[in-house]
Image (tube, grey):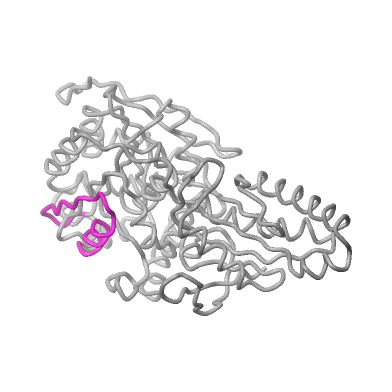
Amino acid sequence: MLSRADDTRVRPDVNYVRNQDTSLAYQVVGDGFTDLLLVSGFVSNLEYAWEYPSLARFLYRLAEMSRLILTDRRGSGLSDRFRDAPTQETMLRDLEIVLDQVGSAKTTLFGMWDGCNTAVLFAATHPERVSSLILFTASAAQKPAEDYPWAWDDHEWEEWLTSIRDGWGTRSWVVKNVRWMGPSMLDHPEELEHWISYTRVAASPSSAEAVMRTSSNTDIREILPVVRTPTLVLHRVGDQIEPIEAGRYVASKMPSARLVELQGDDGIPWIGDVDPVIREIRAFLGESVQAISADRRLATILFTDIVGSTQRLAASGDAQWRELLAEHDELAKRAIAAHGGRYVESTGDGLLATFDGPAAAVRCAMAVADAISPLGLEIRAGCHTGEIELAGDHVRGIAVHIGARIAALAGPSEVMVSRTLRDLIAGSGLTFEDAGQHDLKGIPEPWQLYRLTR
């Protein structure tokens, strides 16, 4: 095991693994029985972290109690940069690839800042791979809502994003914003110098702005109740990055979460009073964890339905219609496979498929529509992200019924989606228009729906 008293510790080596054409930097340090993956958000650099004394001490203390897995998210640190910010589902796939590379079948995810959203979504979509969650400075949404009034509005976000674009990494910008990100650094000039350098090597101004813009449009409020993974929510009561109300909200909505309110006002875990943070994490990792069923998970449902199928059957006859349906099914299955989905079943004149990511489901719906157009066929499609239950080769649950109801409301060649899906698809390049509120048969309360604009 690593010793905190050992000042001659060798830095962990940097390795790379690829997700298609993107190289992801990662490190493994420590040899504990528990795997702990740090999902640090957009501010990280695996090389400089070990030159940053307070951060290095924090990481070594985590490695004393675990096999610590570190990675720079694409666009930051030593990983490849990007032109456009990645979607959440791309970042989930990146985490999965890193875990596969280091041989981690089951891990604890430690999310910080916007990395909390990624950690929560990974636990929701891959419950069999996550033993527990630790969330520091978590939030559920970045725009205000009736039950979430403390979030920034559009004007405040645009001011913040403009400041990042114009000032990220400069001394004046960091000093101005450290007053609410980590105010105790103002009393420690050496700490402040390391933080200035860390922001510079973590991300470029355009990368930081792109990631924050995606984060500003992400809302996981409706996902939180799906996550039954044991969760420790750590939040400092004076935190100005995310108010304590955000941590309380997150913990209250997750069935197996426990909130620990820590004293202090620093939104950075290795700044300020670090001992309580480490103490709570060590105690949490030592708790016995109840096994979570892998049969229930977050997924995106896609339903499609052929427009005017009854009329086409009457006009063409049974034999010709069966042949046309067979061509439709083959083209649809190819599109589903190409977008990483799972074909579940035929619905007679349509299909049901599931996807890990919402953008993939929407793009698949468009691909199916395009593929069958030469056959003289049109479809309507509906997509919804929610909890499903796996039952052999089939899926069931309220999310399946909601997806079917949404598809039924779509017009010819339309893709209709739920607000839940729309709130998870930031950064995908897909755009939607408001389709109003609708009553879904058998579903309580009206649902806000959106129509894909192609």
Residue 77: image quadrant is top left
Which residue is depicted at the point 45% across and 76% down?
446
Which residue is depicted at the point 60% across and 51% down?
353
Judge whether residue 252 is colored magenta. Answer: yes
**If the image is split into quadrants, where does the N terminus sit?**
top left
Q: Is residue 429 left or right of residue 126?
A: right
* Image position, residue 39 (x, y; %): 36, 43
Tally of numbered discs: 0
Extreme-bottom residue of the structure:
436
Residue 325: image quadrant is bottom right
Q: 28 or 106, which is in the foreground?
A: 106
Q: Is residue 276 above or below residue 324?
A: above
Q: Is residue 251 above or below residue 276?
A: below
Q: 297 or 138, which is in the foreground?
A: 297
* Image position, residue 159 (x, y; %): 38, 71
Q: 80 or 360, which is in the foreground?
A: 360
* Image position, residue 261 (x, y; %): 14, 54
Numbered range of the magenta stretch: 244-266
Q: Is residue 352 above or below residue 9?
A: below
Judge whether residue 106 is colored magenta. Answer: no
Q: Is residue 446 left or right of residue 452?
A: left
**If the image is split into quadrants, where does the C terminus sit?**
bottom right
* Image position, residue 416 (x, y; %): 59, 68
Q: Is residue 203 left or right of residue 346?
A: left
Q: Is residue 175 left or right of residue 402?
A: left
Which residue is depicted at the point 55% across and 56% down?
301
